Image: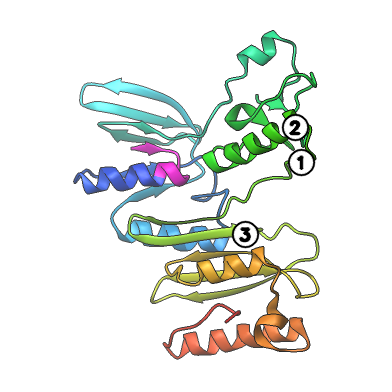
Amino acid sequence: MVIGGGLLGLEAANALKQLGLETQVVEFAPNLMAVQLDNGGAAMLREKIVALGVGVHTSKATTAIVREADGLRLNFADGGALRTDMVVFSAGIRPQDALARGCALQVGERGGIHIDGQCRTSDPDVLAIGECALWDNKIYGLVAPGYQMARIAAATLAGEDACFSGADMSTKLKLLGVDVASFGDAQGRTPGCQSYQWTDGPQQIYKKIVVSQDGKALLGGVLVGDASDYATLLQMMLNGIGAAAASGESDPARAGGSRAEGARRRGAAGQRADLLLP
């Protein structure tokens, strides 16, 4: 039993499955990989993982783990329970901020040392980086943002003009043999943004891109089952190439729409469908 349906939790489930163990995943959130995937992508990922023989239980808050004569029992807040022989925890990170609290530095409600764009804490003579640092109410649990913060902190100490403005959480990986990719504003939270989605049910492929309101900028996307377009789409987002520039259309919104419709038609015919942008 793996508690936690994020990136590391699913990787742990993959390792257990490869050892020949019957594996189940328990996740507190309604979806797997809730940070990286939207509802459609998470639903497709769940379908594929269940088809591989891994049990998935979402919206489950574990309240107790009880030892019994024949193993362990997980009790959930909804009154349900699951029995298992082994529990693996992959339930996120908790910032180690005890030193900051002892120094009366400002910390977040759920932990983490508050920092500004220069990685300064509430005491301007003290800097913080990495998983203990809380920027814009976010704790980054990956190493790449920590490296980025380290560069900003070094620049701050050297008197250079630099500012941490968030980290790119784009990722591409294979989970239990399933290609999964997420980049940019995958959840479509940018005000006024539009999204285009394509689903191939029989092949268990889900693709989505998010574009700006005027269709001129690619903001993010989700790929499940086929991540072959990831590198191209990521570079288009990072380099500011929009739908119109990619397709040659004068009306970017119309270009995106026509490409989306074309993708849907080709998918229905059982042919390969490219995700909106060539």
Name the residue that disc number 1 marks: 162
In the image, the segment drawn in magenta is 1-9
Give me the residue at 58% from left, 48% from top.
35
Q: Position of residue 19 (x, y in %)?
A: 20, 44
Instruction: Report how far apart the C-alphas of labels 1 and 2 lie in the structure.
Output: 7 Å
Q: Position of residue 203 (x, y in %)?
A: 39, 75
Q: Amino acid at mark 3?
A: Ala
Badge 3 marks a residue whose secondary structure is: loop
Q: The C terminus lies in which quarter of the figure? A: bottom right
Instruction: Report how far apart the C-alphas of labels 3 and 1 lie in the structure.
Output: 27 Å
Left or right: residue 201 compared with residue 17: right
Q: Nearer the viewer, residue 151 or 97?
A: 151
Give me the residue at 75% from left, 32% from top.
156
Please count the marks in the image: 3
Q: Is residue 48 above or below residue 134?
A: below
Left or right: residue 86 compared with residue 100: left
Identify the mark at residue 186; answer none if there is no mark.
3
Badge 2 marks a residue whose secondary structure is: helix
For the rendered model, the colour scheme is: rainbow
Image-quadrant location for residue 24: top left
Is any atom of residue 170 visible in this view? yes
Do tag 1 and tag 2 residues touch (Cβ < 8 Å)?
yes
Is the residue marked by circle 1 packed among few (<14), some (14-19), or many (20+) residues within 10 Å?
some
Q: Amino acid at mark 1?
A: Ala
Q: Earlier in the sequence, mark 3 or mark 1?
A: 1
Q: Is residue 78 above or below residue 23?
A: above
Residue at the far top: name it.
102
Identify the mark at residue 156; answer none if there is no mark.
2
